[in-house]
Image: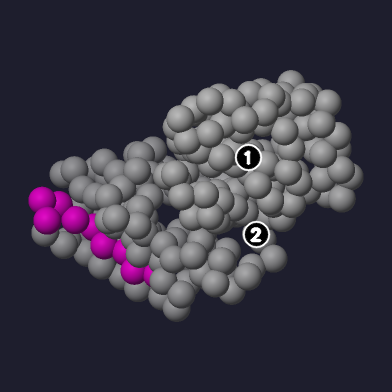
C-alpha cells in the first residue's frame, strides 16, 4: 500500500506518522537531536517498525522543522557571515530607478575589488541588492555574472529580487536571512538524504514552507 511519512521536528521532540488516505496507520515520538538528522532517522525507523510485518510503499516524505528559524533566534554559530553589495556594508556603482531607468553603470573592477576585500576576511556568502531590482533585475544579475566569472563556485550569492518585493529594507533583511541560512540548510538536507538512503527509502523528500505548502 502506498503511504506518506510525515515528520515534525520540534525543539524538544520529533514526531513521525505514516498516513494512507488521511488515515494515520502508525505514529512515534523521539527526542530531537542537535544535528536533527539523527532524530529524524530514529523517528522514521521507529514508525516503520510499528507497521511490521505489513508491506508498505512510501511514496513521499513530508518534513516540517523549526530548525532553521531556531538557528536564527538562537544566533547559531552555524549561520554564515554575509557580505552585502549595493545597499549595505559596501555600496558600489549600478542600480536603477523606479521606472527601470539606469542610475549608474556597473563598474566591474569595483565589484572585484570589494569582493576581494570580503574574501580576504573569510566571507564567501553574499547578498546582491539593487534599488528597485524587482522592476529591473539586470543590475543584480550582471553583478552575479561578474562574481561567477571571477570567483566561480567559491562564492554563494542571494539576489534580492528573487526573495522580496519592492520594499528595500524588507527585501534586504529577507535576503540576508536567506543567505546566512544557506550553508546550514545545505548541510541538513544533505544529511537527511543520506539518512533516507541508509533506510533504503528512495522516495521524494518535501519540506514544509511557512504558508503550510510543501516544496
Residue 31 in sight in this render:
no
Q: Nearer the viewer, mark 1 or mark 2?
A: 1
Question: Is 28 in the magenta?
Answer: no
Residue 34 position in % (x across, y down): 57, 69
Residue 146 in sight in this render:
yes
- Name the foreground residue: 206 vs 213: 213
Q: What sort of colour scheme is used for the picture?
A: one colour
Give the extent of the magenta segment. Answer: 14-22
Q: Quadrant of residue 43?
A: bottom left
Tell me the quadrant of the picture where the C terminus can be found: top left
Q: Quadrant of residue 115?
A: top right
Verify CB contact (< 8 Å) between mark 1 and mark 2.
Answer: no
Q: Which residue is drawn at 21% across and 48% down?
A: 3
Quick check: 13 left or right of 60?
right
Q: Residue at x 76, y 26 (%)?
A: 107
> What is the C-alpha distance between the residues marked 1 and 2?
18 Å
Tell me the quadrant of the picture where the N terminus can be found: top left
Residue 182 position in % (x across, y down): 59, 48
Quick check: 19 left or right of 44?
left
Query: Does dot 1 land on a helix, a strand or a loop?
Result: strand
Q: Is residue 45 above or below residue 193?
A: below
Residue 211 position in % (x across, y down): 29, 55
Q: Label 2: few (<14), some or many (≥20) within 10 Å?
A: some
Q: Which residue is drawn at 74% across and 37% down?
A: 92
Residue situated furthest bottom in the rendering: 12
What secondary structure prevails in the magenta region? strand
Q: Which mark is residue 128?
A: 1
Q: Residue 79 carries which label?
A: 2
Residue 28 position in % (x across, y down): 31, 70
Amino acid at each position: 500500500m502506498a503511504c506518506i511519512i510525515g515528520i515534525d521536528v520540534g525543539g524538544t521532540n520529533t514526531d513521525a506518522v505514516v498516513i494512507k488516505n488521511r488515515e494515520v496507520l502508525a505514529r512515534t515520538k523521539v527526542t530531537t537531536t542537535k544535528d536533527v538528522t539523527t532524530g529524524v532517522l530514529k523517528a522514521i525507523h521507529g514508525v516503520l517498525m510499528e507497521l511490521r510485518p505489513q508491506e508498505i510503499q512510501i511514496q513521499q516524505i513530508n518534513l516540517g522543522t523549526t530548525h532553521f528559524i531556531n538557528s536564527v533566534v538562537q544566533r547559531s554559530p552555524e549561520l554564515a557571515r554575509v557580505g552585502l553589495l549595493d545597499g549595505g556594508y559596501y555600496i558600489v556603482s549600478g542600480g536603477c530607478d523606479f521606472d527601470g531607468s539606469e542610475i549608474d553603470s556597473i563598474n566591474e573592477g569595483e565589484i572585484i575589488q570589494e569582493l576581494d576585500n570580503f574574501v580576504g576576511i573569510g566571507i564567501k556568502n553574499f547578498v546582491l541588492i539593487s534599488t528597485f531590482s524587482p522592476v529591473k533585475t539586470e543590475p543584480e544579475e550582471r553583478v552575479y555574472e561578474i562574481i561567477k566569472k571571477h570567483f566561480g563556485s567559491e562564492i554563494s550569492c542571494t539576489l534580492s529580487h528573487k526573495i522580496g518585493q519592492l520594499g528595500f529594507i524588507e527585501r534586504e533583511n529577507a535576503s540576508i536571512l536567506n543567505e546566512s541560512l544557506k550553508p546550514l540548510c545545505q548541510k541538513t538536507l544533505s544529511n537527511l538524504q543520506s539518512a533516507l538512503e541508509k533506510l533504503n527509502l528512495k522516495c521524494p523528500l518535501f519540506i514544509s514552507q511557512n504558508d503550510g505548502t510543501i516544496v
